[in-house]
Image (cartoon, helix red, strand yellow):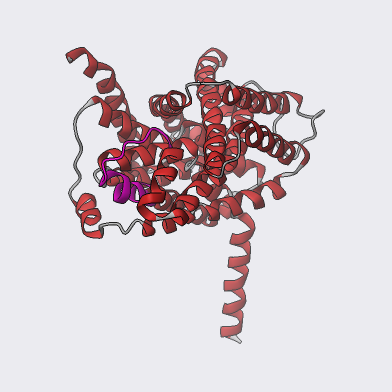
């Protein structure tokens, strides 16, 4: 009887975990978007395995930051944007969110660039693929509901693991990979700093802090769900870093060793064919397509969420258009703008992609400062404020990112 009871308890816990599964895995997986895949591909092609070590501190910081977000959402029942407005005032909120809105329009444009590039590998014109995908994701959010959208997003998250297959086909040098992880190294120049800030900026993006907290609230999670939410976060962060690792490995073991320079993820997919075979190339391109659709849905959604929260408008997928018109108008506008920019002949898509990731890296410290101050405020969080180690990691991330950004600005002066 005792064993039977224990089994029932285990299955009950598993069923409960599967029911609340979603926010952590989805938020983590969206980090591996078209901009992220481009950044990781460029890092692997340019520096081989050298920058793999950056994923270890990125993973630690990612877990700590997402845990803060989830805890704040569960304890307060409010989104991060809402809390920033209430505690920093409307003026400060306005300037922060104008910067974030512009960055996210660039991010969304990058996702549609990923759709265009990946489909061009399969000989499908961007004038067909981009408007079609834009319309499909608009229908999913505007006409669907949170449960349906979340299930589709989870399927997309699992699909990103196909990059493991693409990397293994390139026959990576595991000894060199182990060496690069154990003995970190980097070239101290403007280009390598840009790539490192880009890796951090895409692995720990500013917008994801807002989406994570909003999705916890949308799912209706309570403090009793915290331990399961934490597992969800760790699984999501692990999947994020594993995918990033194998994208870098795929490009390092093929493109870097042959001295092939690329500018975007599409270039990596096309260059892989003669080096690792057509299947590897197609898998890489299809992974880019899935990631781009996934993120082109989530990014405008996250942006609409936090902008509406910041200025007191109704927001949420489960609300009808007439209940949250500002939310749906903003969501629709960002998608339309992203589609139009991509369809402009000779639009500077590579520049938009790389600079968007750098802007993410520069904006991240501002968002983190707001977050850390809020999560340590006893009036807001009660007994659920940060522990010392969480503050050390959080503030350390702020100082390191600020230092890297300032260095990137100062280096050109010494040329």
Residue positioned 32% across, 36% down in the render:
261
* Quarter location, residue 394: top left
Q: Position of residue 282 (x, y in %)?
A: 49, 51
Q: Quadrant of the C terminus?
A: top left
Residue 410's spot in the image, x, y percent? 24, 16
Where residue 359 appears, as percent x and y from the top left, is 42, 24
Q: Residue furthest bottom?
A: 1
Percent across and percent down for residue 368 are 42, 30
In the drawing, does residue 353 fall left or right of residue 409? right
Range of residues picked out in magenta: 245-264
Q: Kindly indicate the quadrant of the structure image that contains residue 395.
A: top left
Residue 253, magenta (yes or no): yes
Quadrant in which the N terminus is drawn: bottom right
> Viewer-proximal residue, 121 or 132?
121
Considering only vertical position in the picture, is 381 above or below 14? above
Q: Main secondary structure of the magenta part?
A: helix
316 lies above or below 172: above
Residue 87 shown left or right of residue 180 in the figure: right
């Amino acid at each position: 009887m005792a064993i039977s009871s224990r089994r029932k308890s285990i299955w009950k816990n598993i069923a409960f975990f599967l029911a609340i599964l979603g926010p952590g895995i989805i938020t983590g997986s969206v980090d591996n978007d078209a901009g992220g895949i481009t950044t990781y591909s460029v890092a692997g092609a340019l520096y081989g395995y050298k920058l793999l070590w950056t994923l270890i501190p990125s993973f630690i910081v990612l877990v700590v930051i997402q845990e803060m977000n989830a805890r704040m959402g569960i304890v307060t029942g409010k989104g991060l944007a809402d809390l920033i407005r209430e505690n920093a005032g409307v003026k400060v909120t306005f300037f922060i969110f104008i910067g974030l809105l512009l960055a996210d329009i660039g991010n969304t444009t990058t996702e549609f660039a990923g759709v265009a590039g990946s489909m061009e590998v399969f000989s499908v014109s961007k004038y067909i693929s981009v408007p079609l995908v834009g319309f499909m994701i608009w229908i999913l959010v505007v006409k669907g509901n949170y449960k349906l959208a979340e299930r589709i997003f989870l399927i997309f998250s699992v699909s990103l693991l196909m990059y493991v297959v693409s990397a293994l086909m390139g026959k990576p040098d595991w000894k060199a990979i182990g060496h690069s992880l154990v003995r970190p190294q980097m070239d101290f120049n403007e280009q390598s700093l840009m790539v490192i800030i880009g890796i951090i900026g895409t692995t720990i993006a500013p917008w994801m802090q807002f989406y994570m907290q909003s999705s916890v609230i949308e799912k209706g999670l309570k403090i009793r769900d915290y331990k399961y939410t934490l597992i969800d976060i760790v699984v999501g962060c692990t999947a994020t870093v594993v995918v990033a690792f194998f994208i870098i490995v795929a490009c390092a073991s093929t493109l870097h060793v042959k001295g092939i320079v690329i500018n975007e993820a599409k270039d990596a997919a096309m260059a892989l064919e003669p080096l690792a075979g057509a299947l590897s190339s197609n898998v890489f391109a299809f992974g880019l397509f899935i990631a781009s659709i996934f993120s082109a849905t989530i990014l405008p959604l996250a942006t609409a969420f936090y902008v509406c929260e910041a200025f007191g408008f109704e927001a949420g997928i489960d609300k009808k258009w007439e209940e949250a018109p500002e939310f749906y108008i903003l969501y629709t506008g960002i998608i339309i703008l992203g589609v139009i920019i991509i369809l402009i002949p000779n639009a500077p898509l590579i520049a938009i992609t790389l600079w968007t990731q750098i802007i993410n890296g520069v904006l991240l410290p501002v968002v983190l400062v707001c977050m850390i101050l809020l999560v340590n405020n006893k009036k807001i969080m009660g007994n659920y404020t940060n522990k010392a180690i969480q503050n050390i990691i959080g503030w350390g991330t702020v100082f390191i990112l600020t230092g890297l950004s300032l260095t990137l600005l100062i280096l050109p002066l010494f040329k």
